Amino acid sequence: MAVRSEIDSQNIPAHVAVIMDGNGRWAKQKGGLRIFGHQSAIKAVRETVEAAAEIGVRYLTLYAFSTENWSRPAHEVMALMQLLVHTIRQETPTLLKNSIRLQAIGQIENLPASCQKELAEAIELTKDGTQMTLLLALSYSGRWDLTQATQRVAAEVAAGRLQPDQVTEQTVAGYLSTAGIPDPELLIRTSGEQRISNFLLWQLAYTELFITDLLWPDFRREHFYDALRAYQQRERRFGKTSEQLTVS
């Protein structure tokens, strides 16, 4: 298990994304209800956010609730929404103390009014944070993100403000929910599942993947360091050869 001193401070990914998976399975192993797993995951979130901010990550995106999660049993969704409100209210002072700015991506308008209110207040209170930006992906889907970006680009073309041959990768990126934010260099997924689950489909094109069998409630800062160390041991070629990378 890695420790902070083993991490090269000159090679920290600017943006780390996390698929927090395994809460339900963790609760089942403990003989509890699924919501028990979600409640127990708060410590993992706290330690990951603190570790990322302390070591110099500029953006941390947490996949907190996907659009597909709405299809879960109604009582679980309601409990999750209540937990979200409580957690945002509880953690906002810590975000302020550590100069962490909170933002959210996804179909926020689909969240219950109480969640939208708490989220908006926390975003406003922390807007001046400079240490790190914490992005919560809520009611989010990569396909939705690409669809809404395409619709907005199409509207610009229809209005004559943009010509079809002017649409580039940069144009599309500018209409995604993460516009202005660098693509993740590292994606961490817990629970051992080998998929990205409709998360940041465009943005993960060249992201390094780190998959651990740990269930999310057991994830701690040492495991975050493990992911960073694995990232630093890889050669990121972006389609080039190793020899090309060594040419100055």
Image (tube, rainbow, N blue to C red):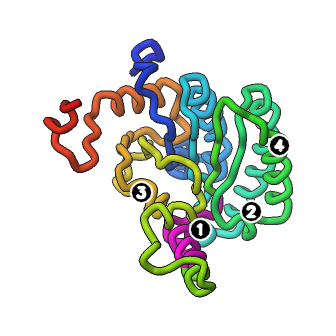
**The magenta stretch spans which residues?**
138-153
* Residue at numbered disc 2: 78
Residue at 54% x, 66% y is: 141
* Mark toward the start of the polypeptide (2 vs 3): 2
* Residue at numbered disc 4: 89
Question: Residue 50: which numbered mark, if any?
Answer: none
* Mark toward the start of the polypeptide (2 vs 4): 2
Identify which residue, 103 or 168, lies in the foreground. Answer: 168
Q: Are marks 2 and 4 in contact (CB under 8 Å)?
A: no
* Residue at numbered disc 1: 67
Instruction: Mark 2 vs mark 4: give the one in front.
Output: 4
Quadrant of res 115: bottom right
Identify which residue, 189 or 182, lies in the foreground. Answer: 182
Give the overall secondary structure of the magenta segment.
Answer: helix
Quadrant of res 58: top right
Residue at 74% x, 30% y is: 99
Could you tell me if residue 223 is visible in this image?
no
* Mark toward the start of the polypeptide (2 vs 1): 1
* Residue at numbered disc 3: 196
How far apart are the two marked residues, 4 and 1, measured between alpha carbons? 23 Å
Instruction: Mark 2 vs mark 3: give the one in front.
Output: 3
How far apart are the two marked residues, 3 and 4, measured between alpha carbons? 29 Å
How far apart are the two marked residues, 2 and 4, measured between alpha carbons? 17 Å
Residue 228 horizontal side relative to residue 56, left or right: left
Q: Are marks 1 and 3 in contact (CB under 8 Å)?
A: no
Instruction: Pinpoint residue 70: horizontal percent, then vertical percent.
Output: 63, 69
Disc 1, SS = helix
Disc 4, SS = helix
Note whether 31 is above or below 92 in the view shown: below
Residue at 38% x, 52% y is: 193
